[in-house]
Image: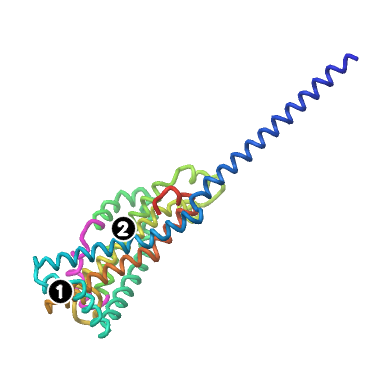
Amino acid sequence: MPSEPSTSTTSASTTSSSTASSSTASDVRSLESGLDALQTAPAGGTRRGRRTLWTALAPLLALALLVAGWQLFVLTGIKPTYIVPSPLDVLTAFGAALERGDVQKAVLTSLERGVVGFGISVLVATPIGILVARVRWVRMAFGPLITGLQVLPSVAWVPAAILWFGLTDATAYFVILMGAIPSIINGLVAGVDQVPPLYRRVGRVLGANPLEQIRYVILPAALPGYVAGLKQGWAFSWRSLMAAEIIAVGGTIGFGLGSMLQQGREIQDMSVVLVAILLILTVGILVELLFFAPLERGLLRRRGLIAETAR
């Protein structure tokens, strides 16, 4: 008889524990479903469709506003049309240059130089950036010099490059390298500096040697800074190339967008000048939209940061 209360108490305790466990599991499932809803809500079909539509329309609306303002300024007659031609005049000049093949030749020549020069810059700058970021005395010795080269206008290298290499493609490539390499190095160094020290300690604990730490720990963790450096490096290389093509004309240097711009200035045809400027701008925007923007978006998405940005 004395054992009955004990059995009853044990049974009640077991029932209470089972109820609490069931309640906890239910709470966990509820929390998980809530988190899933928070993660999937921004990617809803309607909202995503609106966002995609707005992303496509916003630049077109901005472009339409700029063209309308340009046309209104021409209609005011403040400046004669040979100084500020209308959008239709520029479109006519673009069509004529397209028929002559000048547009295709200039875009392909400049784009090829820009891509090749930027690719070489990445190959040269990446190991140097890792060395500067990881070796203290190298950073102390060369860090200020690399920063100084980054702020030096790349057009300053053009006269020296012409004297060293003559009117050849080597002049354009040299100016591109001097413009892009410091930016890529500094971007990579900034990315490595932002890697949490805990990652390196974990790599050492897991037995990674210095090269394996760079390959599997530091470089992946430093990717956001590295990609930012690549974007800046491309911008510098494109600007440097235009400066080189504007100044270094003739010899064996081909006909690029900078040469087209210079040609428009020499014949005093403002429509040709504006066509060249718009082509330079268009190529820069397309490279950003088709290459760097998807690269950066994919990087943020893999790290779960895409919902926290305006992209």
Secondary structure category for the residue under label 2: helix
- Out of 137 and 89, give the one closest to the viewer: 89
- Out of 25 and 241, give the one closest to the viewer: 25
Q: Amino acid at mark 1?
A: Met
What residue is shown at x 35% (from left), y 66% (from top)? Answer: 287
- Per the rendered image, the range of residues in magenta is 150-169
Label 2 and label 1: CA atoms lie apart by: 33 Å
User: Where does the C terminus fall, quadrant-wise?
Assistant: bottom left
Q: Is residue 151 magenta?
A: yes
Dot 2, how many residues are within 10 Å of its Cα: few (below 14), some (14-19), or many (20+)?
A: many
What residue is shown at x 66% (from left), y 33% (from top)? Answer: 24
Q: Nearer the viewer, mark 2 or mark 1?
A: 1
Residue 128 location (% of width, % of height): 36, 58
Q: Which image quadrant is residue 270 in?
A: bottom left
Q: Tell me if 96 is positioned left or right of 137 in this view.
A: left
Q: Which image quadrant is residue 94 in?
A: bottom left
- Out of 303 and 120, give the one closest to the viewer: 303
Residue 89 location (% of width, % of height): 19, 76
**Extreme residue toward the bottom, this view:** 100
Residue 69 location (% of width, % of height): 20, 63
Q: Is residue 198 magenta?
A: no
Secondary structure category for the residue under label 1: helix
- Give the labeled residue for mark 2: 183
User: Where does the N terminus fall, quadrant-wise?
Assistant: top right
- From where the camera sits, is residue 44 visible? yes
Task: Characterize the magenta stretch by its predominant secondary structure.
Answer: helix
- Give the labeled residue for mark 1: 270
